[in-house]
Image (cartoon, rainbow, N blue to C red):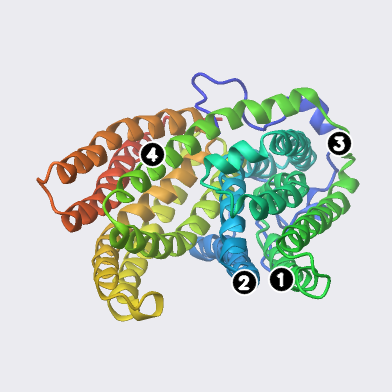
């Protein structure tokens, strides 16, 4: 996922030589080809020529075969969090508040580590597309070792700095005990959580989003049941919730690890760590972390400003962002499909020939068109929720009105957001991570003056709090996402990112 004009070989995260990788590859790749659900991939009979495609399957179906299961896996986690919050909420307001603070800290850290999936997926997909199956699994193994190392490091640092971090997140004397208990018991689940990112990234690169969906679905059900048992019958309270989650994360990591082990064993690949390969994952990951950090700072800056507009605006913003995030799962699933398919296409085609480059552009254009359809559909859904379903979220009339108008802005901007998300996935699939990182930082620099200008105008009485609130939504949905669309769109329109 790097900008290949300035990065070393990124055809795979592992820096192993072709000769080394080939010694582990089977004579017949067809026997070990992973599957996308029940839909076979196009390494079937007669596909020794990498220029051939699946005549019996439309490109749209190939995209949806990856995107739909990915969507299911993405929504499994927030559904669990919702159920878990309901369980802990019965223990009291202070308990729930403490859990919320600790969970926010964990979510922030895990969010910054999502490069473990984003760096592995396209690298594995490219090797898979090139029919280098052993090398594809080797990249996944390297990613898992990096994930385990980072997970153990985060766990140790978390124990040492737990109280200062929780105080910094807003924990007070009434909530710090609950927050500490939840964090300490959750930290044991950080290493498997990191490994799950790399393991799922490996499977996505192998064009399999069904197995992650199954594991996420079963894990969610087990998690809720286990948490209930540990919270109530066992009587561990908020610590029981965190312990149940940690145990479930270990179970999910073990299940995914065993599944991949059984697939890669016939290819002669083992779990022995490879320092050079791990270094390659970290090299790509550093750029992706800058990208994610820039995006996170843009969002946190928006929260900082909106929190100073008033309680009604803050409450309405939280509701609006909940709807926006829900709709983003549909867009993110398409971006995941773009990462996997683009990476595979780049590995499979002869990129020195115009015909091969044309196939890559065809896939890119189809993904973009599909994203616009996604954007229009979700753009209609947003204001429908805001204007006709606001009573589900709040009984406060001013908050409901602010929420409704926010969803109108969200709806208008959904086609832009969809376009941006799929371009993000396309460029990740091409391992153009340096451009993504620098571009994301530029977007933050361009965006920050706008929202702090709104803050200054409201503080100085030039704008009302309501106008400032809607201005913030317009700035984030239309200006920030619009700048992203321009920067990513220019890159995608060129062929610079299509590199062998």
* For the residues bearing labels 4 and 2, Cβ distance under 8 angstroms: no
Q: Can residue 166 be seen in this view?
A: yes
* For the residues bearing labels 1 and 2, Cβ distance under 8 angstroms: yes
Residue at mark 3? 24
Q: Distance between the residues labelled 2 and 3?
A: 45 Å
Q: Point out residue 97 in the picture as x, y percentages from the top left corner.
A: 56, 59
- Where residue 233 sits, quadrant-wise, is bottom right
SS at mark 4?
helix
Q: Point out residue 475 in the picture as x, y percentages from the top left corner.
A: 25, 47
Q: In which quarter of the image is the C terminus?
A: top right
Q: Which of marks 4 and 2 is nearer the N terminus?
A: 2
Q: In this view, does 484 lie above or below 55?
A: above
Residue at mark 1? 224
Q: Residue at x 62, y 47 (%)?
A: 106
* For the residues bearing labels 2 and 3, Cβ distance under 8 angstroms: no
Left or right placement of residue 119 versus residue 134 in this view: left
């Amino acid at each position: 996922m790097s900008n290949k004009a300035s990065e070393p070989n990124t055809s795979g995260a592992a820096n192993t030589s072709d000769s080394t990788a080939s010694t582990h590859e089977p004579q017949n790749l067809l026997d070990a080809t992973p599957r996308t659900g029940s839909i076979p991939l196009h390494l079937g009979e007669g596909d020794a020529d990498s220029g051939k495609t699946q005549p019996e399957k439309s490109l749209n179906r190939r995209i949806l075969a990856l995107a739909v299961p990915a969507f299911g896996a993405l929504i499994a986690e927030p559904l669990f969090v919702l159920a878990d919050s309901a369980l802990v909420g019965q223990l009291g307001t202070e308990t729930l508040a403490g859990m919320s603070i600790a969970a926010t800290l964990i979510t922030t850290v895990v969010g910054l580590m999502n490069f473990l999936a984003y760096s592995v997926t396209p690298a594995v997909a490219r090797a898979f597309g090139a029919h280098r199956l052993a090398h594809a699994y080797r990249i996944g193994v390297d990613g898992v070792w990096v994930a385990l190392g980072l997970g153990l490091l985060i766990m140790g640092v978390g124990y040492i700095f737990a109280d200062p971090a929780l105080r910094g997140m807003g924990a007070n004397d009434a909530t710090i005990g609950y927050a500490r208990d939840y964090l300490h018991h959750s930290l044991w689940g950080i290493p498997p959580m990191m490994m799950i990112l790399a393991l799922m990234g490996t499977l996505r690169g192998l064009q399999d989003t069904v197995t992650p969906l199954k594991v996420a679905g079963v894990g969610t059900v087990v998690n809720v049941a286990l948490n209930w048992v540990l919270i109530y019958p066992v009587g561990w309270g908020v610590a029981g919730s965190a312990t149940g989650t940690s145990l479930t994360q270990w179970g999910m990591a073990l299940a995914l690890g065993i599944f991949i082990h059984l697939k890669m064993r016939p290819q002669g690949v083992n779990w022995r760590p490879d320092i050079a390969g791990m270094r390659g994952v970290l090299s790509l990951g550093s750029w992706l972390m800058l990208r994610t950090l820039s995006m996170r700072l843009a969002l946190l800056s928006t929260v900082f400003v909106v929190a100073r507009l008033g309680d009604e605006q803050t409450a309405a913003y939280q509701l609006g962002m909940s709807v926006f995030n829900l709709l983003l799962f549909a867009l993110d699933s398409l971006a995941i499909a773009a990462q996997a398919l683009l990476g595979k296409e780049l590995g499979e085609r002869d990129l020195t020939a115009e015909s091969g480059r044309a196939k890559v552009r065809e896939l890119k254009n189809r993904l973009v068109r599909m994203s616009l359809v996604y954007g229009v559909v979700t753009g209609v859904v947003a204001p429908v929720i805001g204007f006709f379903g606001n009573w589900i979220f709040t009984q406060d009339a001013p908050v409901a009105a602010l929420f409704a108008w926010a969803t109108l802005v969200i709806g208008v901007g959904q086609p832009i957001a969809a376009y941006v998300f799929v371009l993000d996935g396309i460029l990740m699939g091409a391992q153009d991570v340096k451009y993504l990182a620098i571009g994301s930082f530029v977007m933050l620099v361009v965006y920050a003056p706008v929202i702090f200008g709104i803050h200054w105008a409201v503080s100085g009485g030039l704008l009302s709090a309501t106008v400032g609130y809607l201005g913030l939504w317009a700035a984030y949905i239309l200006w920030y996402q619009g700048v992203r669309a321009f920067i990513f769109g220019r890159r995608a329109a060129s062929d610079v990112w299509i590199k062998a």
